[in-house]
């Protein structure tokens, strides 16, 4: 397992398998928790086979009006993803 880590601020980011290419941007504990929450509501769309992964990301783009990569998102964007993907929110 490879990652980039900043000991001073406890921020890190994992890397793609067997590479040094980061999966997103550095994140401290609070931001990592928000990203995990966003993935928890977003990922079931494609991991459960409801749609293809690229289609799930396109749906998210339609809902937020821009392309979003959760691994590069700040806390506010994570909150927007969670709201947009809320099961009570229509899927367009």
Image: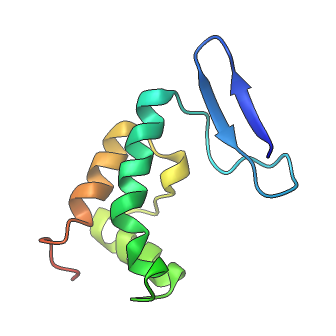
Residue at figure coordinates x 54%, y 47% from the top left: 72
Residue at figure coordinates x 61%, y 40% from the top left: 25
Residue 23 % position (x, y): 67, 51
Residue 56 % position (x, y): 43, 78
Residue 10 % position (x, y): 59, 20
Q: Quadrant of residue 61?
A: bottom left
Q: In this image, 72 relative to 61: left or right? A: right
Residue 35 % position (x, y): 44, 46
Residue at figure coordinates x 76%, y 56% from the top left: 16
Q: In this image, 10 relative to 79: left or right? A: right
The relative height of residue 38 versus residue 90 in the rendered view (above or below) is above
The relative height of residue 3 versus residue 71 in the rendered view (above or below) is above
- Outermost residue on the top side: it is 8
Image quarter hosting the C terminus: bottom left
The relative height of residue 50 versus residue 85 in the rendered view (above or below) is below
- Outermost residue on the left side: it is 88
């Amino acid at each position: 397992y490879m990652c980039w880590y900043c000991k001073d601020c406890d921020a890190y980011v994992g890397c793609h398998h067997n590479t040094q290419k980061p999966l997103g941007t550095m994140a401290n504990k609070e931001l990592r928790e928000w990203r995990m929450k966003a993935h928890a509501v977003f990922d079931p769309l494609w991991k459960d086979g409801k749609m293809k992964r690229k289609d799930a990301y396109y749906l998210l783009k339609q809902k937020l009006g821009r392309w979003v990569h959760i691994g590069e998102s700040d806390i506010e964007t994570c909150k927007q993803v969670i709201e947009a993907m809320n099961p009570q929110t229509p899927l367009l």
